[in-house]
Image (cartoon, rainbow, N blue to C red):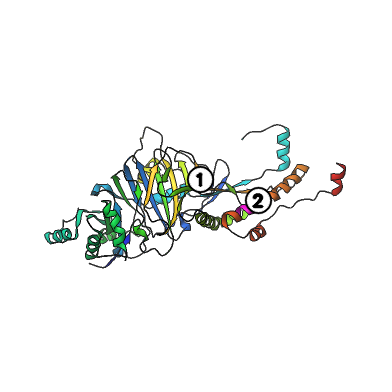
């Protein structure tokens, strides 16, 4: 058997490049940009659809090497049968990312003189072969049991249970998997919890036959009271921080972490106009600053919304068929969509996140989105005294926007101010204040 490189855990070394920026009309304001997962070099994406003890977990990866070198090991709470494993399509993650990404909106100030006129008028509104006898004997000696073995799509799967981590490590090595140093120590807690292991590698015959250019996401369905996502194995070879985006879908409401803090990303902040051209740089700097302020041990809510609607929309809500592809299994064709999405963004390292992620579902349906605002000053001719007062107020507002940006990102305030195009004001003659 050819040597196989193993990627342990939930595809936590991947990058997903998604659709680019695409403007779209919104109910209040004009959506202009988003901060999707293409920002991050080490961003992994996972979808978890859960109702009660029933879970559908979808894992994506952007593995770039040779197909024969790919392998994946994921701790799972139960033994999975072939019918519980499904191969999905990458585009469903792209759709969820586009729908829930942090966003920039813009507004245009009206003519302040016309506003004065309106106000004066008071107008207001708005199966494969079984192991051989010798293989069975060897597996038994290692304390490893091959519970299930099957092929789905372009993957060969083996579901293992184990009694000790060194036996599992030996089994993986003897079966051609190259184990990173330190794997045995991290495997042990899962064995102690009596968890099983889903091991996947590429079936080259199927892969070549279909002419795939990229490995597709793996989805698994199971029933268990454990509501968790294993991330520790993915840190074995990690040399730096990793980003993880988790799309949590529920019929009840927001989903939070129970063993780490869950906080909202800073939102609804006015920032200077030039941020429109640098929105991705802004969001990355703002996220890093927030991450450091929270002691690098927190999950950020970037989006929490009922999937019937959006405002402003960075992408259209997913339809019923797309939700089904994302793992939503409780939809009733006779009822309205009752899917609530929580988008969590974690940046983690082994020392800051020593435990796997544990979740719980809440009934909280409060809507939230990472949203940033630019206000364009009125650019026409000012022909009234109220307009001149407006210009002075706008200059104060522009200065406040610059301070907001410096506070959120840590960027130098003076350098920010040099990039702001301040509104020109017409000085009021000194005698006007004396005699009027």
Q: Which mark is residue 291?
A: none
Q: Which residue matches tag 2? A: 400
Is 342 placed above or below 184 here?
A: above
Q: Which residue matches tag 1? A: 369
**Which residues, given as a range, are shown in magenta?**
399-405
In which quadrant of the rendered view does residue 120 lie?
Answer: top right
Q: Residue at x 37, y 48 (%)?
A: 358
Q: Nearer the viewer, mark 2 or mark 1?
A: 2
Most common secondary structure along the magenta stretch: helix
- In percent of width and height, residue 5 lies at 30, 65
- CA separation, marks 2 and 1? 22 Å
- How many neighbours does mark 2 have within 10 angstroms: few (below 14), some (14-19), or many (20 or more)? some
In which quadrant of the rendered view does residue 281 lie?
Answer: bottom right
Q: Classify residue 120 as left or right of residue 42.
A: right
Mark 1: secondary structure: strand
Does the image show residue 272? Answer: no
Mark 2: secondary structure: helix
Could you tell me how many numbered marks the image carries?
2
- How many neighbours does mark 1 have within 10 angstroms: few (below 14), some (14-19), or many (20 or more)? many
- In percent of width and height, residue 286 lies at 54, 55
**Residues at marks 2 and 1 touching, judged by CB atoms closer than 8 Å:** no
């Amino acid at each position: 058997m050819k040597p196989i490189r193993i990627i342990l855990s939930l595809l936590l070394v991947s990058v997903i490049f998604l659709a680019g920026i695409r403007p779209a009309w919104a109910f209040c304001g004009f959506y202009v940009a988003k901060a999707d997962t293409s920002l991050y070099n080490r961003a992994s994406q996972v979808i978890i659809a859960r109702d009660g003890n029933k879970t559908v977990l979808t894992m994506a990866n952007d593995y770039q090497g040779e197909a024969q070198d790919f392998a994946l090991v994921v701790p799972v709470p139960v033994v999975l049968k072939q019918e519980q494993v499904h191969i999905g399509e990458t585009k469903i993650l792209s759709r969820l990312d586009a729908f829930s990404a942090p966003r920039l909106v813009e507004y245009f100030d009206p003519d302040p003189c016309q506003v004065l006129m309106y106000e004066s008028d008071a107008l207001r509104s708005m199966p494969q072969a079984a192991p051989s006898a010798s293989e069975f004997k060897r597996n038994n000696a290692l304390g490893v049991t091959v519970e299930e073995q099957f092929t789905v799509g372009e993957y060969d799967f083996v579901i293992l249970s184990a009694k000790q981590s060194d036996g599992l490590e030996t089994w993986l090595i003897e079966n051609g998997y190259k184990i990173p140093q330190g794997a045995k120590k991290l495997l042990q807690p899962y064995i102690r919890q009596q968890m099983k292991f889903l091991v996947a590698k590429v079936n080259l015959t199927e892969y070549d036959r279909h002419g795939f250019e990229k490995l597709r996401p793996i989805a698994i369905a199971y029933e268990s009271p454990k509501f968790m996502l294993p991330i520790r194995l993915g840190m074995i070879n990690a040399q730096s921080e990793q980003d993880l985006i988790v799309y949590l879908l529920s019929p009840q409401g927001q989903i939070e972490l129970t063993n780490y803090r869950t906080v909202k990303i800073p939102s609804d902040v006015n920032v200077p106009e030039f941020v429109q051209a640098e929105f991705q740089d802004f969001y990355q700097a703002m996220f890093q600053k927030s991450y450091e302020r929270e002691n690098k041990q927190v999950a950020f809510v970037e989006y929490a919304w009922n999937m019937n609607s959006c405002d402003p929309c960075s992408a259209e809500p997913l339809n019923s068929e797309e939700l089904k592809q994302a793992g939503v299994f409780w939809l009733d064709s006779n009822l309205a969509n009752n899917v609530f999405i929580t988008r969590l963004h974690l940046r983690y390292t082994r020392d800051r996140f020593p435990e796997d992620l544990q979740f719980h579902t809440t009934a909280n349906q409060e809507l939230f989105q990472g949203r940033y605002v630019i206000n364009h000053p009125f650019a026409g001719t000012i022909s009234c005294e109220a307009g001149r007062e407006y210009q002075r107020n706008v200059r104060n507002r522009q200065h406040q926007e610059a301070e907001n940006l410096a506070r959120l990102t840590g960027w130098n305030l003076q350098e920010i101010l040099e990039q702001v195009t301040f509104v020109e004001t017409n000085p009021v003659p000194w005698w006007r204040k004396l005699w009027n």
